[in-house]
Amino acid sequence: MKYYQHKFDKVTKYLHHRPPFLLVDKVVSITTQEVVTQKTVIAEEFIQGHFPGAPVFPGSMMNELTTQSAGILIASQYNPMRNFDTEDPNHNEYALGVLVKTDYARYRGFARMDDVLVATVWLNDRVSEMFDFSGTVSVNRNKIMRNRFRLMNIKSSALQKPN
């Protein structure tokens, strides 16, 4: 299987995700309250079947693009660990930015091959290790998706399969 080689910039410094599930190609900007990222729609395996003859980027993947972007904001600005290693996630005490709730996702357009998606995500509130976010995905400055969701930093051991 051949996957597109992303231009990761700062992305893999902050996310454990790797191809084929890493959606963020580039971090455009980041502050304590906002992150802007980009993703170019390409012929990845999942898009070829959605829909044959008229491939569009799935709405669920737009939602994932915003949550990965929010994860970058958490890891860069609100990381509770002194030593954070994206290459060895078993070494980390916390799993950062685990999706725990989606309040809504609304779609108003499509993303097609070669479109550049711009995800803008805002931190609305933070209580301890729980983060409330809103996000949008745009193509050519037209908003095609907006959502609201919560991510949480949890102990890494919670992700492991119980014996």
Image (cartoon, rainbow, N blue to C red):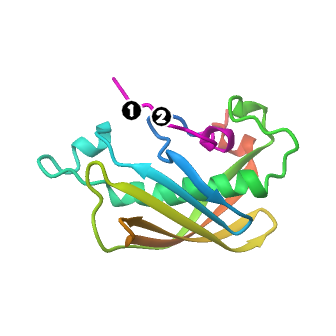
Residue that label 1 marks: 4
Give coordinates of residue 36: x percent, y percent: 57, 61
Magenta segment includes 38: no
Mark 1 residue type:
Tyr
Residue found at the very far top of the displayed protein: 1
> What residue is shown at x 48% (from left), y 55% (from top)?
65
Whether tag 1 and tag 2 are in contact, CB under 8 A, the answer is: yes
* On screen, residue 51 above or below 100: above
> What residue is shown at x 49% (from left), y 45% (from top)?
25
How many residues crowd mark 1 within 10 Å: few (<14), some (14–19), many (20+)?
A: few
Quadrant where the N terminus sits is: top left
**Looking at the magenta stretch, what is its main secondary structure?**
loop
Q: Nearer the viewer, mark 1 or mark 2?
A: 1
Which residue range is magenta in the image? 1-16
Please tell me which of labels 1 and 2 falls first in the chain.
Answer: 1
Say left or right for 112 vs 53: right
Magenta segment includes 11: yes
Give coordinates of residue 66: x percent, y percent: 51, 60
How many residues crowd mark 2 within 10 Å: few (<14), some (14–19), many (20+)?
A: few
Distance in Å between CA atoms under marks 1 and 2: 8 Å
